[in-house]
Image (cartoon, helix red, strand yellow):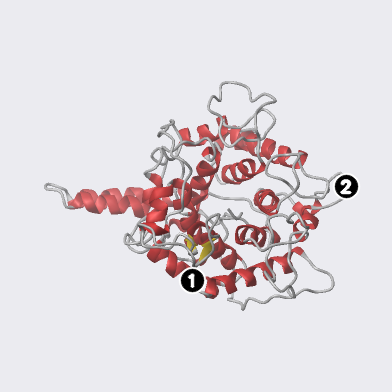
């Protein structure tokens, strides 16, 4: 998924969130691999098998909570910290954190990048920060993760999913965004070949005069060396090229998407071209589509039990949410509006089926364009996300007051006691806000 951004989280106490219509068709749910038995793990979000996405889902959950004014539970933070290997890298999931990772551990840049970014928004112990900044467990984990990412940069300046493989646009973009979100300057990071991450990113950009995929980014060149447009890679590259991450706020004023290829291409210009490609793709019907299933062609399949054609294009909810984030980051909130409206109407079933990371994607999309994630199509996505893991350490006061209001309907509830509770809670607002300060360099 696209990278991307954060900070400005504490100010989101004004109950913003993404909520999706409860009536969305189940047919829009993305297909899943063969189901594995539920694996409840203490401190982790979701009960689905975490083998391939444990760190990813945990990290996205943190980021979505942070932009919603929610502070993750300490044991949830501890779970993520324990997933890190001694080298600083993260695997998708460590089933036994008590054992050293060892040379057989399959570390990946995607899990490490999102973990580093998610930890950057976690509150650090005030005592440790005051005594010696950067020595608390969270800060040390962030620094080790960033150092590992730098150590596995490819010669062309980019990154692959697993170190040693050819660079790809998604992994390169995720690392760029994570480094930028944690105070690093990706443009100053040169590989052993003298290349920067942006040099690699530009290698995946399709020119505006191309017959197909103009302005988009490819995941990797195909076997013939041709660049083929990939919406997921494009959304991630837009954020990276703009120096932003998944928790970004939309840029203003609203701008018209354009695709231009100057003589001297820059990462920012290429990112804006990618945003123009996404805007055009979304303008067709308000969402992106998944590729046809293998062995079928769009429009030629047979009718299935869901009422859709096996070969017909199916909505790609996750990448649509990512595209909304990318467009908002580029200052095209107006172009993202139809897609956000489509998500409000159609994405609830998808999020319910796919769990924490899906809820998080929708919350982050809503945050970017200024939608209300706590009343999005009548659903409170933040509450649903919180319910998939350990109870948060803290939630916005507005949310606490909603619970107080519900309690006031119970027999014998003292109204004056409620007023007193409100006043006492109010004195803590300044402390809560000050405790969520973020230092960000985009």
Q: Residue at x 78, y 66 (%)?
A: 266
Identify the residue position indicated by label 1 in the image: 286
Which percent across, then down, holds residue 162?
69, 40
Q: Quadrant of residue 165?
A: top right
* Residue 15 appears in the rendering: no
Which percent across, then down, holds residue 413?
16, 48
SS of the residue at dot 2? loop
Say which quadrant the C terminus sits in.
bottom right
Callouts 1 and 2 close, C-beta under 8 Å: no
Q: Residue pushed farthest right?
A: 193
* On screen, residue 244 above or below 284: above
Q: Earlier in the sequence, mark 1 or mark 2?
A: 2
Mark 1 burial class by Cα count in 10 Å: few <14, some 14-19, many 20+: many
Which percent across, then down, holds residue 178?
65, 49
* On screen, residue 339 above or below 410: below
Inter-mark Cα distance, 1 to 2: 42 Å
Horizontal relation, residue 151 to residue 50: left or right: right
What is the count of numbered marks? 2
Q: Residue at x 65, y 33 (%)?
A: 106
Q: Residue pushed farthest bottom?
A: 256
Looking at the image, which is closer to me, 399 or 22?
Answer: 22
Looking at the image, which is closer to me, 253 or 32?
Answer: 32
* On screen, residue 139 above or below 434: above
Q: Residue pushed farthest top?
A: 99
SS of the residue at dot 1? loop
* Residue 237 appears in the rendering: yes
Horizontal relation, residue 298 to residue 172: left or right: left
Q: Quadrant of residue 271?
A: bottom right
Identify the residue position indicated by label 2 in the image: 193
Looking at the image, which is closer to me, 288 or 295?
Answer: 295
Horizontal relation, residue 69 to residue 167: left or right: left
Mark 2 burial class by Cα count in 10 Å: few <14, some 14-19, many 20+: few
């Amino acid at each position: 998924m696209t990278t991307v951004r954060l900070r400005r989280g504490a100010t989101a106490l004004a109950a913003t969130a993404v909520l999706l219509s409860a009536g969305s068709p189940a047919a829009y749910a993305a297909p899943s691999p063969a189901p594995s038995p539920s694996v409840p793990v203490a401190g982790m979000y979701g009960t689905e098998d975490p083998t391939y996405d444990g760190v990813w889902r945990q990290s996205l959950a943190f980021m979505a909570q942070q932009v919603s004014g929610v502070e993750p539970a300490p044991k949830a933070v501890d779970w993520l910290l324990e997933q890190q290997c001694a080298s600083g890298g993260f695997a998708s999931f460590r089933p036994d954190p008590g054992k050293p990772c060892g040379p057989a551990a399959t570390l990946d840049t995607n899990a490490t990048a999102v973990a580093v970014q998610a930890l950057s928004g976690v509150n650090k112990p005030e005592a440790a920060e005051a005594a010696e900044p950067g020595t608390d467990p969270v800060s040390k984990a962030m620094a080790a993760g960033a150092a590992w990412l730098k150590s596995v940069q490819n010669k062309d300046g980019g990154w692959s999913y697993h170190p040693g493989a050819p660079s790809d646009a998604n992994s390169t973009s995720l690392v760029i965004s994570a480094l930028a979100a944690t105070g690093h300057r990706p443009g100053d990071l040169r590989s052993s070949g003298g290349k920067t991450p942006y040099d690699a990113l530009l290698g995946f950009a399709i020119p505006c005069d191309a017959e197909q995929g103009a302005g988009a980014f490819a995941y990797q060149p195909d076997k013939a060396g041709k660049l083929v447009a990939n919406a997921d890679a494009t959304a991630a590259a837009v954020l990276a090229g703009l120096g932003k991450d998944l928790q970004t706020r939309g840029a203003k004023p609203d701008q018209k998407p354009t695709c231009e290829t100057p003589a001297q291409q820059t990462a920012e210009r290429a990112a804006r071209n990618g945003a123009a490609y996404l805007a055009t793709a979304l303008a067709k019907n308000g969402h992106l589509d998944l590729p046809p299933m293998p062995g079928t062609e769009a429009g030629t399949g047979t009718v299935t039990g869901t009422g859709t054609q096996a070969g017909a294009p199916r909505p790609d909810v996750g990448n649509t949410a990512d595209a909304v984030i990318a467009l908002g980051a580029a200052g095209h909130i107006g172009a993202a509006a139809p897609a956000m409206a489509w998500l409000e109407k159609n994405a609830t079933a998808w999020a319910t089926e796919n769990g924490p990371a899906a809820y998080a994607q929708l919350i982050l999309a809503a945050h970017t364009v200024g939608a209300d994630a706590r009343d999005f199509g009548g659903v409170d996505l933040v509450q649903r996300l919180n319910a998939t893991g350990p109870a948060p350490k803290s939630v916005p006061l507005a949310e606490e007051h909603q619970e107080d209001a519900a309690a006031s309907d119970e027999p014998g509830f003292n109204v004056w006691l409620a007023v007193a509770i409100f006043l006492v809670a109010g004195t803590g607002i300044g402390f809560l806000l000050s405790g969520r300060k973020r230092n960000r360099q985009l």
